Image: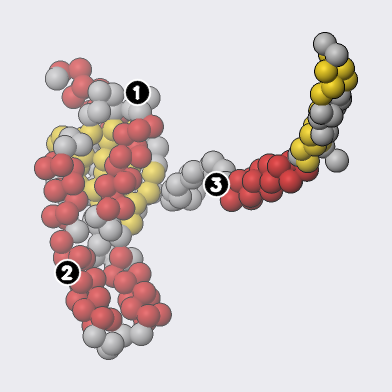
Amino acid sequence: MAEIQEGGGGGHKGGKKRAKKQSTRIDMTPMVDLAFLLLTFFVLTATFSKPKSMELTFPAPPPPDQKPDEIKKGITFLLSKDNRIFYYEGQFRAAPDEKGPATELKELSFDQGSLHKYLLDKSKDMHERIKALDAKHQAGQLADTTFKRMVREVKADKESYTYLIKTDDEATYKNVIDVIDELNVNVVGKYVMVDILKPEYDLVKAKVGTN
């Protein structure tokens, strides 16, 4: 038991008799118990830092002898240094052919009126379809499970855009996360991260070097 004792005593001084002091005793046990209770409370209720992760989709590489499928509803983002973000739509063509002209890169920025607006415009039809489903769900015409399933089907529709994210060797991790955040905010259907092709890399370097 923790305690503080202060001895008392009397005695004679100067021929006068003093009254004997009573012993002072302070029991510290309740204070110690309280300190341990508070410590236990804070340990049990504290929120510890948890590692944050982000789910990314990486497609399986095709067999070496298989020609890659042509992307008809695809939009490719190419990230480089200095927060530069280039893009092109459809299949990449290093040179013009019977299906179309050679690919030319266009540029967006991370400003609110650039990448965000571009994705919003591209996802407008899908958003309208999801909005119509949500109205039926709120009106009680669709069960929760049916509503969620139909929303997934809308996002996975072959008519919805697939966004490909590619980076060169000078792009920053922050820019990749910013693009993914914008894709999630705009509730896009599908997006994947893939390796940049050599012809795409050359186009990006030409753009970065001439601007």
Residue occupying the far bottom of the picture: 141
Q: Using the rendered image of the protein, determine whether residue 132 is visible from the camera's viewpoint.
A: yes
Residue at position x 28%, y 81% from top?
137
Q: Amino acid at mark 3?
A: Thr
CB within 8 Å, label 2 to label 1:
no
User: Which quadrant holds residue 8?
Assistant: top right
Residue at position x 37%, y 49% from top?
192
Mark 1 vs mark 3, CA separation in Å: 36 Å
Residue at the spot of label 1: 170
Residue 205 x, y percent position in the rendering: 25, 22
Q: Secondary structure at mark 1?
A: loop
CB within 8 Å, label 1 to label 3:
no
Coloring applied to the structure: secondary structure
Which sits in the foreground, 54 or 90?
Answer: 54
Q: Residues within 10 Å of mark 2 (few under 14, many from 20)?
A: few
Q: Is residue 139 above or below residue 41?
A: below
Residue at position x 31%, y 34% from top?
175
Q: Secondary structure at mark 2?
A: helix
Residue 155 x, y percent position in the rendering: 30, 65
Residue occupying the far top of the picture: 14
Q: Is residue 28 left or right of residue 68?
A: right
Mark 3 vs mark 2, CA separation in Å: 40 Å
Q: Tell me which label, 3 or 2, sits earlier in the chain.
A: 3
Q: Amino acid at mark 2?
A: Glu
Q: Is residue 56 left or right of residue 138?
A: right
Residue at the spot of label 2: 128
Residue at the spot of label 3: 47
Residue 199 x, y percent position in the rendering: 29, 31
